[in-house]
Image (spheres, helix red, strand yellow):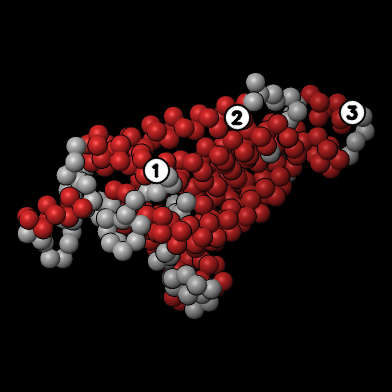
Amino acid sequence: MYFLKRLLWLIPLLLVVSFVCFALLRLTPGSPFDRERHPASPEIERQIAAKYHLDEPFWKQYGRFLGDLLHGDFGPSLKYRNHTVNDLIRQGLPVSMSLGLLAFCLALGIGLPLGCYTAMRQGRWGDYVGSLYAILMVCVPVFVLAPLLVMFLAVQWHWFPVALWGSARHAVLPVVALGLFYSGRVAHLMREGMLNIMRAEFIKTARAKGLSETAVFLRHGLRLALLPVVSYAGPMLADLLTGSFVVETIFQIPGLGAAFINGFLNRDYSLVIGLVMLYAVLLVLLNLAVDFAYTLLDPRVKYE
């Protein structure tokens, strides 16, 4: 029942998101056709505006947008004249999802064991080295890390392509840039979660019963220590699946992140709103999945 209520809350939430986004884009100075190479005459501009209903009052435009949205139609792109927003999402979403899922797996694959390792060796050299890695990855932004990888691994040593998307070798550098960046945060959360759980009374009781440190860790500590990581993983996955603006722009990847940037710069209203709505739906659903994962990891958690 709780999860059904959360799903129903998705409807008013999406209405608010769509209205705010629609209003902000209309209030932004400029027109979708200001950046044309050959500016059209005022008469042609009026005809184009009439074709896309941009000459109608705000409420009429918004009502038309909601009507199309109910049918799953985000409307035509104002920049890419022969494509609809649905077409652009269908083209870019598989690319962004592939990139995002690989980076997500890499972040968890590095962050989770590293967080456990540093927590189990608190105050030793392993802890210091692992924590230094986590801090570095958190502090170094992707727009710094990605060009460094390109400079050394692509330009200087020619191990991987500099940019573009199409083969496994093209995916390595963008996946590594995103995965390393998020792995630092995951490792930090896992370490903190482990340290908090290992100080709990029930862990002391388990040790007093004579269980080995490994058994205490695996049977009693690991599951609850994952809770902070699970909370972070939902929004992180939503960010990754809908495209990383920076990485997709640096590596010239035809995903949703690059489409969003181009859509915003070109005032492509329907494209920007379509991508924002997609992100909002993913964020809500993944947060719902996080709540469900909480009930599996910690039986004490009950939702009403």
* Residue drawn at x 70%, y 50% as measured from the top left: 113
Residue tagged 1: 69
Residue tagged 3: 208
* Residue drawn at x 70%, y 25% as measured from the top left: 301
Residue type at the position of mark 1: Leu
Against 143, is 277 above or below? Answer: above
Q: Is residue 184 left or right of residue 54?
A: right
Q: Work out how far the residue at label 2 is from the one at label 1, CA to CA, in angstroms.
A: 22 Å
Against 206, is 139 above or below? Answer: below
Q: Are marks 2 and 1 in contact (CB under 8 Å)?
A: no
Q: Are marks 3 and 2 in contact (CB under 8 Å)?
A: no
Residue tagged 2: 4
Against 89, is 200 above or below? Answer: above
Among the two numbered marks 2 and 1 on one chain, the one whose residue lies closer to the N terminus: 2
Q: Residue 44 placed where, x, y %? A: 11, 58
SS at circle 2: helix
Q: Residue 257 placed where, x, y %? A: 41, 55
Q: Work out how far the residue at label 3 is from the one at label 2, CA to CA, in angstroms.
A: 43 Å
Residue 35 lies in quadrant: bottom left
Among the two numbered marks 1 and 3 on one chain, the one whose residue lies closer to the N terminus: 1
* Residue drawn at x 51%, y 60% as measured from the top left: 94
